Amino acid sequence: MATNNDAPSAAEVAQAGVSEAQIAVHWREEEYYPPPPAFVAQANANDPAILERFSEDRFPDCFTEYAEMLTWDRKWDQVLDTSDPPFWKWWVGGRLNACVNCVDRHLQERGDENALIWVPEPEDAETRYITYAELHRRINEFAALLRDFVGAKTGDRITFHLPMVPDLPVSMLACARLGVIHSQVFGGFSGTACGHRIADSKSKILVTIDSYYRNGQLLDHKKHADEAIAAAQAEGVEVEKVLVWRRIPGEYHSDSPMVEGRDFFIDELLDGYRGQTVEPVSMPAEAPLFLMYTSGTTGRPKGAQHSTGGYLSYVTGTSKYYQDIHPTDTYWCFADIGWITGHSYIVYGPLSLGTTSVMYEGVPTYPDAGRPWRIAEKLGVNIFHTAPTTIRMLRKLGPDEPAKYDYHFKHMTTVGEPIEPDVWRWYYEVVGKGQAAIVDTWWQTENGGFLGSTLPGLQPMKPGSCGPAVLGVFPVIYDENAQEIPKGSGKAGNMCIRNPWPGIFQTVWGQPERFVETYYAKYCKNTDSKDWRDWPYFSGDGAVQAADGYFRILGRVDDVINVAGHRLGTKELESAAITVDEVAEAAAVPVIDELRGKIVEMYVSLKPGNEASAAVEQKVADAIDREIGKIARPKNVWIVSDMPKTRSGKIMRRVIAGISNFSDVGDVTTLANPEIVDEIRHYVQHEKLERGETPRELSEQEKQEIAAYGHAD
Ligand code: WT7
C-alpha cells in the first residue's frame, strides 16, 4: 500500500534545505524534437526574419502584418489606443465585417471549394460537404430571417445553445454579418447554466436545436431551452423567441412542446427567405463580435467580450503561422465550437484564411477508438488539433489504432491543459507517425488566440513545454511581490503578459470593474498611467521558464497543492504518475492535514488490460518520489475505473477532492458520468475508514477551499 509514512515533515524539509525552487527543478528537462524537414519546407513561417519583424521594439506596429491579412472597408487611423487603460483599442478608425472576411472574400477564387466538412456521429450517415458558395447562401438566408422575422439589430445579443452541427457556424456568421453579438453556450451545459448566460447578456432570442447525436444516442436538446428560459426569467430577462434548428429537417425529436408564438422551426421559416442576400454591416474594428462565457466557480458568469478587428486579425495571423494553414489544407480541429478554441480555430481563423475546416458531431471513441483516424483517412486531413484529454482517452482505448489507418498529418496541436511528456510522445510517435510538427498552444478564453507556442517551422518542440511566447507577445513571471523570476532559475511564479495584443478581450461583459480587478489590479504599477508598460496582464496560471526561454505551464495558480509551504503543481504530480506504464490518467488532489496543511492524494485510472494492485499503487508513489521529491509523496493512491469528467472531458478535481476530504462534492449534474461519483466515494471512504483515517470536521474556510479546487467547472 502506498502511504506517505516515510515522507519528510515540514521541519525535516526545512532542515534538508529543500526549497520550492528545487522541487520545480526536479521536473526533468526534456529533449528537443526538431521540426520535420518536409514540414519546414512548406511552412508559412520558415524564415527567421519573422522573429525580427515581431521584435519588442516593433510593438505595436508589428501586428499590422496580421491586420493586413484581412479585407477592410476602411483602413485604421491608429494601431493601438491606450488612452483608457486597461481597455485597449486596436485598429481604431478601421471598419470591416467578419462574415465578409470569412466567406464573401473567398467566393471568387474558392467558391466551389469546401469551407466546412461536417461528419455526423453515426458512421453510416452521409458526410456533408459545404462549399464557400453554399455557406454564403445559408448564412445570407439565416441573416435575412434574423433581420426580418426576429428584428435583430446591430449590437443586440443572441444566445445559442448548440452542439457540433453546421447550423452553429452558419448562425455565428449570420450574426457577424448583421453586427449582432453572438453568445454561444456549450451544448453540453445544462439549461439552467444557459439561462444564467442569457440573463447576463440580456438576450431576447435563443437559438437551439431539437436533438443531436452523442455516443450513439439521439439526445433531446430542446428540453434544455425550457429550463433556460425559466432560469433567465427568474433573473428578470424574458426570452421573446426560440428559434429551433432540426437535426433532421422536417422531423422533431424532442419531448419538449413547441410553444405557440414563441418557438419556431428554422427550416420552416427559411422557406420564406430562400435566395435572399443581406448587405453586410460595416462594423468599427472595436465593435464586439461575440461573448464567450468562461468557467467561473462562483458568482455571476463572466462574459469575455471579443472585438471584431483585433480578434479577427489575431486569429487569422496565428492560424496562418502557428496552425500553418494554407487554403489547400484539410484542417481538423477536434474541439467544440462551444469553447473559445472552436470559435477561433474551427470557425473564424481557418475560414478567414479560406481553408477547409472539418467539424465532427460526436465523441472521439464512437463507435470505437479508431474513429478519428478513419475520419482523417477518408477526408485527407493533414492538420489535426485537439486537447490532451482526448489524446489520453484515445491512447487508453486504442493505443495501436493510428497505425492501422493511412492518413498523414503534417501538423498537430495540443491545447487546453498541460500535456504530460509521455502522452506527448505517444501523440508524436503514434498519432503523428513521427512526421508531424506539434505545437502545444497555451492561452485562455480571455486571450482570443495563442499566447505560448513554438513557431512550428522554426523552433524545436519540447514535450510538456508550450515553448516561448508567440510573435509580438512578451511575458514575464512574477512572484507574489511583483519581483521578476528570471528564466532558468527553476522557480515557478505567476505567468503574466507585459503588453496588450490584438486578440485580448475587451472587458467582462457588463462588469468592467471585475475585468480590471481580476486581470490587471494585481500587478498594475501605476493606476494613473496611460502607458501599457504599467499594466501587465495577470493570467492566473503558474509557470516556470527554462534557461532556453521555454515556458512550462503548471496550471491555474489556485490548483497548486501547498504541502508544508511547498507549492506543488497539480500537473507536475500528474505527469509523474503517468510515467508509470499501466497508468492512463491521473489526477492529484489536496487533503487537509493537521501537520502539513495539505498532503497529496492521487487518483489514477489504468490502461485496458491492467488490474488494480498494490504494486501499481506503489509504482505511482515511487514515480512521484522520483520525479518530484519525497515531500510530494501521496498519502494514498486510488485506482479508479474512470475519473468524474465534464462533458468537455476535463477531470472534475473538486469532486474527488471532496471525496478524499469527506466533504461536499458539490453540483455533479453537469458531469458526463455522474454515476462514477458514488462508486468512487464508496470505495475511497470505506478504505480510508478501514485504514483508520477518521474524518475530521472541516472548517468553513477549508470546505470552501476544497470546493473551489480545480478549474474544471
Ligand atoms: C486555461 C484556460 C486555451 C483555450 C481552451 C481553454 C490551461 C490552456 C494550455 C496549454 C498548459 C493550458 C491554462 C489556462 N491551458 N492551454 N497548452 N498548456 N495549460 O480555455 O477554458 O479559458 O482555460 O487552460 O490553465 O489558464 P480556458
Image: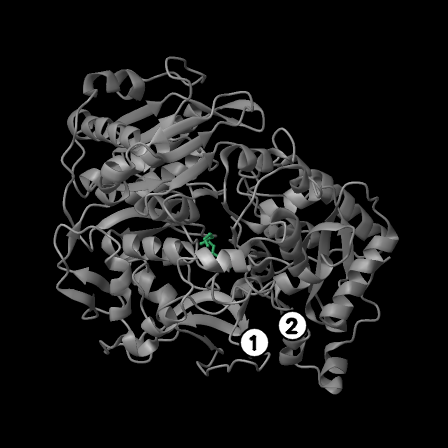
- Residue at 52%, 74% (x, y): give it: 493
Q: Which mark is residue 546?
A: 1
Residue 210 or 103: which is nearer the viewer? 103
Q: Is residue 290 visible?
A: yes
Measured from the top left, where is residue 568 in percent x and y?
64, 69
Measured from the top left, where is residue 327 in percent x and y?
36, 45
**Amino acid of disc 2:** Glu
- Residue at 36%, 29% (x, y): give it: 130
Sequence order check: which comes first, mark 2 or mark 1?
2
Q: Indicate the secondary structure of the residue bearing disc 1.
A: loop
Task: List the residue tagged with mark 2.
Answer: 29
Measured from the top left, where is residue 470 in percent x and y?
41, 66
| Among the 4 quarters of the image, the one containing residue 154 | top left
Left or right of 456, for residue 499: left
Residue 497 or 422: which is nearer the viewer? 422
Q: Is residue 269 above or below residue 49?
A: above
- Residue at 20%, 66% (x, y): give it: 79
**Amino acid of disc 1:** Ala
Badges 2 and 1: C-beta atoms under 8 Å apart? yes
Q: Indicate the secondary structure of the residue bearing disc 2.
A: loop
Q: Residues within 10 Å of mark 1 (few under 14, many from 20)?
A: many
